[in-house]
Amino acid sequence: MTVGSGSEPATGRGPTSGTGARIHVVRFAPAKLNLTLAVVGRREDGYHALHSIMVPLSLGDALTVSAAPSGATRDSLRVTGLPLAPALDNLVLRSIIAARAAVATTWAGAPAFPPPLAARLVKRIPVAAGLGGGSSDAAAAIHAALAAWAATLGPAETAALAASMGSDVPFFLGGGSAVITGRGESVEPLPDIQGEPPAVLLVTPRLPLATAAVFKVYEGGAREPDAGRARDISERLARRMSAGVSAAALLALTPEMAAANDLRSAAASIIPGLHSFVDALEKLVQRPVCQSGSGPTMWTLYSSLAEARKAARFVRLAAVNGTLPLVGAGEPFVAATTIAGRPTPPSAQPGDRTAGATRPRSVHNWRDVDEHGSDEPAEEPVESKGDDPR
Ligand code: C5P
């Protein structure tokens, strides 16, 4: 599958006369990893104030947005790849609908509403896993819809639109590593990690975890023993990364990052067996294991993708032979990938569909349409309903 990421359509033919929508926009929607996640307070709006370092990964979903077939009155979404929770389907559709409302009066075709779109999502990021997949899809949907309609929105309005779709969505607008503060809406870009990108082993127990539930038990007292430690580490790492950090230096900081997530105890208090799972995983990979976001994804770093792939094979084998206890509905999702750099601006070369893309360089063990060559939808198409402003 061809994956592109610029704000321009990958195969733009300009607005069509019939629908006003360009033909095909393809966006890569990367997963994210929280290198650190400190909860630094409770806000008046009920959300938690955070200090977190987030990095994009080469593992990601691919979102294609096209003009809806003539006669269609609603946006639609077709999903292939990994299974998707229904609420997350709607984040793509809700983002398209919210983008339509945001540009309704300013786009070239006003007073008509921007036309319906047909979206296709190839899902490779496990859902409700602490990897930001739904949020990344939402950011990709906003960009893709605007490009399809040839509509523009100022940076502040785009950021507000993204924040209204979820706390992690603003991070994905920027495309690179960043320090996240506030509820997630404040995104301060960090330079790329120097040299060869660090490789990442991801291990996600097969038990989706809702962020709201994790924060709830955190509020109920499921806290880390050393209050303030995650924040100290997060702030120190942010200063180091601002000055420029090498992959080797980041790798050496894994033990600190493993102690820099304030939601670890909260996630473990919801998922029975998560503690023993992590203990066994640490023994297997012989290095500290960190949690991404509200979990349950666990990760650790390697200096090369080849090493991470080797570790992934080892972990899969351990899950099959019982050395790694299973949590949830079966074998975990195991992937070897890399921390991605900031995407380069689209190339001047016409027809280069991957120009500006964060090229996917990852392998994982769950069924994927690309690996098996099948393009059959895993889900029935979902149609937007109710809240469409048209
Ligand atoms: O913003 P989002 O919908 O992703 O957040 C999901 C839930 O996680 C919120 O309803 C809230 O309970 C919790 N949350 C929080 N503080 C944040 C982000 C999320 O309490 N900064």
Image (tube, rainbow, N blue to C red):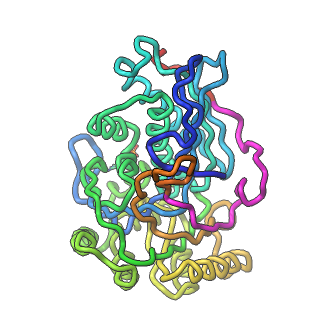
Query: Relative to residue 146, is residue 229 drawn left or right?
Result: left
Please give the count of numbered marks on the rendered protein. 0
Quadrant of the rendered image containing residue 55:
bottom left
In the image, residue 92 above or below residue 337: above
Query: Relative to residue 318, is residue 144 drawn left or right?
Result: left
Q: Main secondary structure of the magenta part?
A: loop
Please tell me which residue is depicted at 53% across the width and 32% down the height of the picture.
93
Residue at the farthest top position: 111
Res. 217 visible in picture: yes
- Which percent across, then down, holds residue 29? 51, 51
Res. 50 visible in picture: no
Please tell me which residue is depicted at 25% across the width and 40% down the height of the picture.
45
Quadrant of the rendered image containing residue 71:
top right
Out of 141 and 106, give the one closest to the viewer.
Answer: 106
In the image, residue 240 above or below residue 45: below
Please tell me which residue is depicted at 52% across the width and 25% down the height of the picture.
15
In the image, residue 260 above or below residue 348: below
Please tell me which residue is depicted at 56% across the width and 77% down the height of the picture.
305
- Which percent across, then down, holds residue 98? 42, 29
- Which percent across, then down, holds residue 346? 45, 51
Residue 186 shown in magenta: no
Out of 134 and 110, give the one closest to the viewer.
Answer: 110
- Which percent across, then down, holds residue 159? 31, 40
Residue 377 shown in magenta: yes
Q: Which residues are magenta?
A: 358-382
In the image, residue 263 above or below residue 86: below
Out of 161 and 191, give the one closest to the viewer.
Answer: 191
